[in-house]
């Protein structure tokens, strides 16, 4: 297997995508934050003292995805044309599931942007709820699907199910 981010001397490098053609690219990633029953109920009822947790986390996830190239050293700066963060409450697990979808027309994919958006959204939920529950756990983060580019489409074999 060839590592594209390493040159012939083993040094890190940004991949040269100048010869690639622009294609429509999209990726979705998901993850969950697990919390105590008390914290989950307050979040679900919208009575967390810091305010609108999911609304704030949605904006944070979008902002984080836009800044991916500032956080991941070898990521390309992308002109994102689509970003969304959606949440699903999972009462049986006392969890919130976040899904971030990113899109662009360009020479490189948006998987890292979708994954970054999910992580930042979930970290924001933690930040806003930590006064209620410091033992929250973030996990099950994964790429769900991606489309476009030379490698074509990918759908995670586990699907959208975050229970695995």
Image: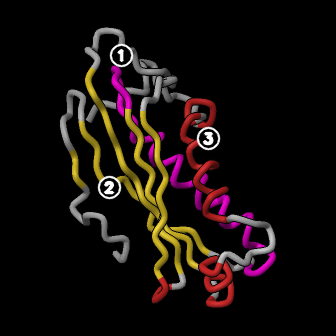
On the image, the x and y values in percent for residue 38 come to 68, 89
Q: Earlier in the sequence, mark 3 or mark 2?
A: 3
Q: Earlier in the sequence, mark 3 or mark 1?
A: 1
124 horizontally vs 160: left or right: right
140 horizontally vs 34: left or right: left
How far apart, in angstroms, are the residues tagged by discs 3 and 1?
25 Å
Q: Which residues are magenta?
A: 104-133
Q: Secondary structure at mark 1?
A: loop
The front one of 6 and 152 is: 152
The front one of 18 and 13 is: 18
What residue sits right under mark 2 in the picture? 144
- Neighbor class of circle 2 (other Cα within 10 Å; few <14, some 14-19, many 20+) is many
What residue sits right under mark 3 in the picture? 63
Quadrant of residue 30 in the image? bottom left
Query: Vertical placement of 61 versus 134: above or below?
Result: above
Query: Which corner quadrant holds the C terminus?
Result: bottom left
Residue at point 65%, 59% (across, down): 123
Mark toward the viewer: 3 or 1: 3
Q: Are marks 3 and 2 in contact (CB under 8 Å)?
A: no
131 horizontally vs 126: left or right: right
What residue sits right under mark 1 in the picture? 17
On the image, the x and y values in percent for residue 69 come to 56, 30
On the image, the x and y values in percent for residue 70 come to 63, 31
On the image, the x and y values in percent for residue 22 come to 29, 17
Query: Vertical placement of 90 versus 121: above or below?
Result: below
Quadrant of residue 67 in the image? top right
Residue at point 42%, 19% (across, down): 7
Residue 120 in the magenta stretch? The answer is yes
Q: Earlier in the sequence, mark 1 or mark 2?
A: 1
């Amino acid at each position: 297997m060839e590592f594209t981010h390493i040159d012939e001397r083993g040094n890190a490098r940004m991949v040269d995508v100048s010869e690639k053609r622009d294609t429509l690219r999209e990726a979705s990633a998901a993850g969950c934050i697990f919390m105590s029953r008390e914290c989950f109920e307050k979040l679900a009822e919208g009575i967390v003292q810091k305010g609108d947790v999911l609304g704030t986390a949605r904006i944070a996830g979008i902002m984080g995805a836009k800044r991916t190239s500032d956080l991941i050293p070898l990521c390309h700066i992308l002109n994102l044309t689509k970003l969304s963060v959606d949440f699903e409450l999972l009462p049986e697990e006392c969890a919130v599931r976040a899904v971030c979808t990113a899109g662009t027309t360009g020479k490189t994919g948006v998987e890292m942007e979708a994954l970054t958006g999910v992580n930042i959204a979930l970290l924001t939920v933690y930040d806003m709820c930590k006064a209620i529950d410091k033992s929250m756990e973030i996990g099950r983060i994964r790429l769900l699907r991606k489309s476009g580019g030379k490698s074509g489409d990918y759908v995670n074999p586990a699907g959208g199910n975050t229970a695995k």
